[in-house]
Amino acid sequence: MHPVVPMIFDYRELMKLLGTYIDAIPPLLDANDRLHTHFLQAGTTTGRMASQEPNLQNIPVKSELGRAIRGAFVADKGFKLVALDYSQIELRIAAFLSGDEKMIEIFRKGEDVHTQVASFVFNVAAKDVTPEMRRQAKVINFGIIYGMGVLALKQNLGSTREDAQKFLNDYFNTFSTLAKYLSDVKAETAKKGYTETLFGRRRYFEGIYSKIPYIKASAERMAINAPIQGTEADIIKLAMVRIDAFLKEKKLEDIAFPLLQVHDELVLEIREDKAEEVAAETK
């Protein structure tokens, strides 16, 4: 309520933008004003790539000032920056790993997954789903695949514990195959000590055997998400390999350059006159 509090938040945002980007990035440019990051192939526990010196995977996008930073990244003369990303990749992976027919059907029909989930959970027609219902469905959709419990859900929804519990129950009753899959992952990790992605890449969890409740619970939450996020990391890496082969095969190496990978997104620099065509084929 105190007027100084919003000012402190504004100040923090400005200091972060100034310190991390505005002051830090220009000295890192090469003679051609190009910026080079270092990619770490196994930079995260889930198998996602990381980027450092500077980290180009966390250029801000949420606030207007943050988005202004993105304006500093421009294509070379005669080229265009092209960004391609996967739509709802983690939820799609959750759908096919679990084999949940209801969720698969939503994607098969090309419907908006958050609206459809809200329609199922709140028991209303899709056309009657309000923006608030959709927001709540979105929170629970992403919460579920990150192993979110009832307390975290309550906090994220801004609801009571009872409402959050009912929401969770309704969700799991609707998507019962997904619910069973998540609980099987937890049980299997406790038995084997590791999870696997669709492509067989393992991640080990020592904490799953801990006698300390919060360490065990944390390991269980991470285990639920690991096959999903790990499979996503594998898929985007396979895409990068295929795009590289495609550019070589079509002799486009002087026309299109893969620049950046941001988890489920790829950024390329493509010659202006070929941008539309190459982007469509890359997609």
Image (cartoon, rainbow, N blue to C red):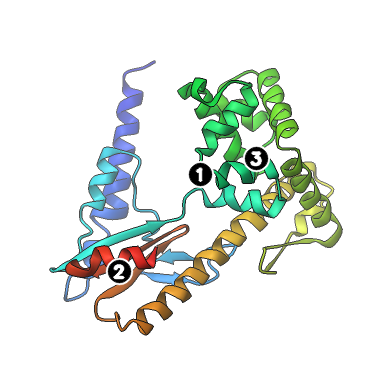
Callout 3 touching callout 2 (CB < 8 Å): no
In three-dimensional space, the C-alpha distance between marks 1 and 2, rounded to whole angstroms, equals 25 Å
Report the residue at 68% width, 31% height from top: 171
Q: Nearer the viewer, residue 7 or 276?
A: 276
> Could you tell me how far apart the alpha carbons at marks 3 and 2 are, in whole angstroms?
37 Å
Which of the marked residues, 3 or 1, is nearer the chain's N terminus?
1
Which amino acid is tagged 2?
Val
List the single residue furthest toward the top.
1
The answer to which of 33 and 86 lies nearer the viewer is 86
> Do we see residue 53 in this rendering?
no
Residue 67 screen position, x and y as percent: 27, 45
For the N terminus, the quadrant is: top left
Q: CA distance from mark 3 to mark 1?
A: 21 Å
- The answer to whether residue 160 is above or below residue 267 is above
Would residue 168 appear left or right of 87 to someone viewing this image?
right
Give left or right: position of 82 versus 101: left
Q: Which of marks 2 and 1 precedes in the sequence? A: 1
> Which residue, given by chain and number where applicable, does mark 1 sit on?
110
Judge the density around disc 3: few (<14), some (14-19), many (≥20) Cα neighbours within 10 Å: many
Q: Are marks 3 and 1 in contact (CB under 8 Å)?
A: no
Q: Which of the labelled discs sits on residue 278, or is there none? A: 2
Q: What amino acid is found at the position of numbered circle 3 in the picture? A: Ile
Residue 185 drawn above or below residue 133: below
Task: Identify the residue under disc 3.
Answer: 144
Instruction: Please name the residue shown 57% across and 47% down the image.
Output: 108
The answer to which of marks 3 and 2 sits earlier in the sequence is 3
